[in-house]
Amino acid sequence: MSAHTTPEQVRSKIDHPIVDGDGHWVEYDPVFSEKMRKVGGDLAADGFLKAMGRTRELLSMSPAERRHKRLGQQAFWARQAENTLDRATAMMPKLLYDRLDELGLDFVIVYPTAGLRFPRIQDDATRRAVIRAYNTIARSSIGTRKEGAPVNQLGSALNGVARSIVGSRRRAATDGEQVGSRRDVSLRKLDSRGAPLPGNLGRNQSLAGRLSKMPRSVASVFGNPKDLQAALSKDGVLSLLVTGSGRFRARLTQIALNQMGLAAGEEDLSRVAFVAVPSDAVLVSLAIGDRSAPIWGGVEVRVGEMITLGPRQRIHAKTDGPCAWGSIRLSGDDLARYGRALTGAEFVVPPVAKWRPPRAALRQLRHFHRAAIRAAEMRSRALADNEAAHGLEHQLIHAVVECLAGRSVDEETEAALRHRDILAQFEDLLQNQPRLDIAEICGALGISEATLRQCSEEQLGMSPGDYRALRGLQSV
């Protein structure tokens, strides 16, 4: 066995992402040509094969003939020939994605190989047919097309044929789990000159307007629960009551994208938070790291699960000790619109629900969330780039939809909804009329003390009297 250090071992010792900035997808000509024929007809397939036969044509010439015609010999020795697995990896994007950890890579920017020849096809009709068919096949073979930035210089059009991010995997520093991303491709749609086609002007102007809002991120450490609550107020956290003993300490990283907010937190003491989701938002809560996640309305969230809270939902989230959590706040309208577009059906998120998404979908969501949080903590410039942040936002929304589209969901029962509503009204009374005793509170709510006690112990982890007393003590 070789004593050389493997790429994976090298990657494990490096604390920043490793990017392969010039990978190539090696298209398999026999299969690709038949796909070209199905998509673009004989003109596209024959044009593709002729372009790919240029190397063999040049090899058939003598060096003197090539010099006379001033033709350079195109590369023919650049394909992996000895190791079948490596050759297949260059030809199959999914296999490349699966091997990124083994190769010691986090992100791979992949360019076409055959596609770089197409802008040099002389016949306009053939060039147009080949490029259109290639775009279609690449999209269906690798992923969905995203809008690319304009190519401003004609000479850069070759590089703009199909710049794509095939995927990424990162070994998480917090939980040791290997996670992966959706294999998405950014294929720039080309015109007959090999330059990107202009999109709808109004939509592009709208996009530019959205991108003008600079993404922001902040990483903070808190020693006072009131400061943590204030930092989380945009996510609807109205109060945060510490129930554990000892020194309070919390770490929070927040990212404000164009239409989405991300957060990741670690807390050392048990607590109860009262959350009122903003009227225009959906809140997604994820379990991250090796600590327990918050318990939402008495519902535990385990590894492989996630919680969604709809607009205007009011709920208590408690922890029983040190915890770690991640959250995504996004527009409910955006989520519904993306959901309809991606699933072809009405996309409705229940008021409060626990989901068990497909493992791959949840991995990719956790990956995108963790990658963004890590970039913020490392003060990476990536989040300062409007287009990159906008792309991340779309990836996250897509990942959320994929997680929720599986429909493996436990919706809130009528009894749990009633108990949650009682505790929300209980919280209102404690805020507005703090001098009321428990009997008076129950009278105002129209319930028995036994019912209030059941709701409180179920969702707050203590009696209503203890909660009232602790709340009053910490409000001083």
Image (spheres, rainbow, N blue to C red):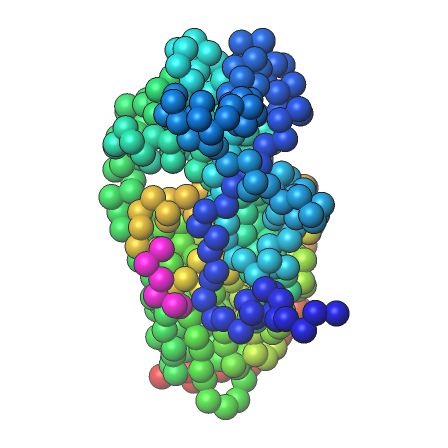
Front one among 95 and 391: 95
Left or right, 406 with respect to 332, comes to right
Front one among 88 and 356: 88
Q: Is residue 23 above or below residue 239?
A: above
State the image quarter where residue 291 is shown. Answer: bottom right
Left or right, 94 with respect to 119, comes to right
Residue visible at 53% across and 17% down?
A: 50
* Range drawn in magenta: 377-382
State the image quarter where residue 38 is shown. Answer: top right
Q: Quadrant of the C terminus?
A: bottom left
- Location of residue 227 in the rendering, given as x and y in whole percent from the top left corner: 35, 75
Left or right, 64 with respect to 56, comes to left
Q: Quadrant of the N terminus?
A: bottom right
- Location of residue 25 in the rendering, given as x and y in whole percent from the top left corner: 55, 38
- Location of residue 174 in the rendering, given as x and y in whole percent from the top left corner: 57, 71
Residue visible at 41% across and 10% down?
A: 123
Front one among 419 and 147: 147
Q: Is residue 6 above or below residue 463?
A: above
- Location of residue 43 in the rendering, given as x and y in whole percent from the top left corner: 53, 9
In reply to whether residue 94 is colored magenta, the answer given is no
In reply to whether residue 381 is colored magenta, the answer given is yes
Residue visible at 52% across and 81% down?
A: 268
Let me know if residue 318 appears in the view. Answer: no
State the image quarter where residue 7 is shown. Answer: bottom right
